[in-house]
């Protein structure tokens, strides 16, 4: 999954790895319930990007059915704004290899 995200193929990462009932939480504010809602959210977000300047995958750690991946994302947006996120993505997985919960945390 991280390999797809690193290549900027975030939508296919969600489509290929999220379970149908997966839930997400962005910094405890924006939440999605179900794969379809996350796909819709990602389509909207990705459609608002003018240019991808950088996606860097720094590290991933995994312990049984939980993983945490550190990324830096740097985007120029179509509205003229810039996004620079350094974040930790925590995932809970099913035995089948599907993500059932994904949370985003701001890294220092």
Image (cartoon, rainbow, N blue to C red):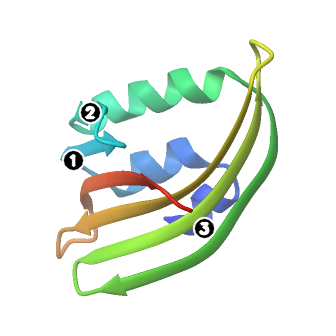
The x, y position of residue 4, in whole percent, is 59, 60
Query: Which element is circle 2 on?
Result: strand
Q: Nearer the viewer, mark 2 or mark 1?
A: 2
The x, y position of residue 17, in whole percent, is 37, 57
Distance Cα–Cα, label 1 vs label 3? 20 Å
Read off the residue under disc 3. 3
Q: Residue at x 28, y 40 (%)?
A: 28
The x, y position of residue 12, in whole percent, is 51, 47
Distance Cα–Cα, label 2 vs label 1? 8 Å
Check disc 3: other Cα within 10 Å, few if <14, some if 14-19, many if 20+: few
- On the picture, is 102 further left or further right than 20? right
Residue farthest toward the top in the current orientation of the protein:
79
Q: Residue at x 18, y 69 (%)?
A: 94
Read off the residue under disc 2. 32
Query: Which element is circle 3 on?
Result: helix
The x, y position of residue 44, in whole percent, is 52, 21
- On the picture, is 42 further left or further right than 6? left
22, above or below 99, in the image: above
Query: Which element is circle 1 on?
Result: strand
- On the picture, is 47 further left or further right than 62? right
Task: Answer whether labels 2 and 1 touch (C-beta < 8 Å).
Answer: yes
22, above or below 67, in the image: above
Read off the residue under disc 1. 22
Residue farthest toward the bottom in the current orientation of the protein:
63
Which numbered disc, 2 or 1, marks the residue that appears first in the sequence? 1
Q: Nearer the viewer, residue 59 or 10?
A: 59
Q: Nearer the viewer, residue 7 or 69?
A: 69
């Amino acid at each position: 999954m991280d390999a797809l995200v690193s290549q900027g193929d975030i939508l296919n990462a969600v489509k290929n790895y999220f379970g149908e009932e997966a839930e997400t939480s962005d910094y405890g504010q924006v939440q999605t319930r179900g794969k379809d809602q996350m796909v819709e959210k990602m389509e909207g977000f990705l459609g608002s990007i003018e240019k991808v300047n950088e996606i860097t995958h720094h590290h991933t750690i995994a312990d049984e059915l939980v993983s945490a991946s550190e990324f830096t994302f740097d985007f120029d947006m179509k509205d003229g704004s810039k996004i620079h996120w350094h974040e930790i993505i925590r995932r809970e997985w099913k035995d089948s290899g599907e993500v059932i919960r994904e949370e985003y945390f701001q890294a220092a």
